[in-house]
Amino acid sequence: MSSSQFNPAHLDLREPVFARIRKGLWWLRLVTLILVDYILLLFAWMLAGNHASLDFPGYTQSNSLPIIAIAIQIAVLALQGSYQSGKKRYDYLNIIKTLTFAHGLIVFVGFLSQPIVDVTRQTLILSWLMSISLVCAGRATVNFSLQYLRNQKILGYNRVFIICEHENYEQCVATIKKESRYIISGTASPKALDRYYRQETLNKLNELDVTEVFVSWDAIKNRMFLRWLFQSSGITLHILPIELKPIYRDIEFEKIGGMPCLSFDCPVITGKDFWIKRIIDFSAAAIFVALTFPIYIAIAIAIKLDSPGPVFFKQTRLGLRGKAFKVWKFRTMRTDAEKFQKELEALNETKDGVIFKIKDDPRITRIGKFLRRYSLDELPQLFNVLFGEMSLVGPRPLPMRDVDKFSEHHFIRQEVLPGVTGLWQVSGRSNILDFEQVIKLDLSYIENWSLYLDFEILLKTVQVVLKKEGAY
């Protein structure tokens, strides 16, 4: 299953905190643009009405037509991104095309509301021309006004922070200072982005009330996933300068001080999809456990009759943000399995030794082979889902023995809740013996997450389990 099959995620599933509004005065610009557009569009329809008969079906001798028409125009402008940050707000060609489409939509609404449409050609042409002219003029006026107020230091500045190598510091500062809208609140070396220091960095940014962060390309190499850290706190991330390499989704190209820059903008509300996913996980797990509880009892009895020892096997694994937790499974091995594993390390079949996998593992019990073949041993992990330690879908949590062999870039798996099943499991399960392939699959899931993707993986998991593909 390739990542190209999945719809890109527009949210952030990596932040287990309550949703927050992004930082900065973006809302003031948004309200200003919508208000200016409303006034100008209303004026355009009034001018058109003074020069032609506004005989629209269902709205004759009524003031409803301009209100509904303006609502349609503003809604279409919003859907086309004309109220988003950056240069999209002043893309006049896009505004012209959008308002032209909106006028066609207005006529279509008229056809639906009455059998016969009676809008004079003169009215439609005049309102179209006036709407385009006034909205474009209004956007230009707002743009020039904001620039003037910034130059006069009347309007507030965005507080920004720079993370770069020491030798690039002067160049980065000079580039950002060419833009009159920024105040540099502080700087740091790339070390601030390291896994062990980034929370401290985030706390500092929040204390300084930073709204945007500029990071040099050299400082963020192999650290692209850190944009989640900033976005979850409502902080826009800019990367400069650009180096042509494979890049990720939701990127805008801007010019900062004349230099091309990659910008990762924030959604208006950050972190909300974590709770959407969490609510669905909890509800689905609770219903499934309630419906299949007799199966749990039957498996427990079978384990007790097959071999001495406890019914459940609990093992420490690494979860979200590196927090350890106890994962629950039905016991499928003899009680001294972990001690016996050291004697079997030489038989490990994985390519790099990070994961321990061997066929015909002598530690597995008779009932254990059956449970593993159909993944029934994983059922108790639904309790981990109920406790909030796991999700139904996500990167599989690994034993501490495997985590101790991680390279630095492997810890990207810990940026999301681990899952009962995941892209790794439905793409080969135990047949994948190279851990780097596992990491690529995990990264593909994280980058392309959507509720549809979760549902697709769950359906694929059922198929894989029933076919007994790659299970041992």
Image (spheres, helix red, strand yellow):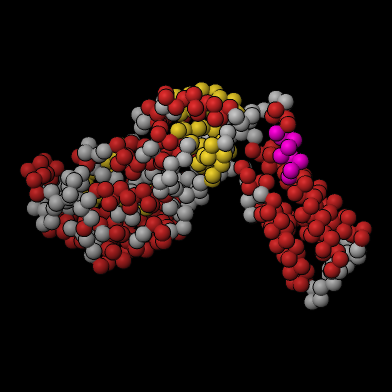
Q: Residue drawn 52% across and 39% down? A: 261
Residue at the left extreme?
343
**Quarter location, residue 195:** top left
Identify the magenta region.
Answer: 139-147
At x 49%, y 27%, the residue is: 171
Residue 384, how many percent across, how many down? 34, 46
The secondary structure that most of the magenta stretch takes on is helix
* Location of residue 317 with respect to 357 vertically, above or below: above
Q: Is residue 127 above or below residue 174?
A: below
Q: In which quadrant will I find the N terminus?
A: bottom left
Residue nearest the observer in this picture, 50 or 310:
50
Instruction: Name the side, left or right, on which 65 lies relative to 245.
Output: right
Which quadrant would residue 268 be assigned to in this image? top right
State the residue in front, 347 or 370: 347
Magenta run includes residue 144 = yes
Relative side of 396 to 356, left or right: right
Q: Is residue 162 above or below residue 357?
A: above
From the viewer's perspective, tell me whether residue 339 is left or right of residue 294. left
Q: Is residue 413 visible?
A: yes
Q: Is residue 232 magenta?
A: no
> Residue 453: x and y, percent?
42, 58
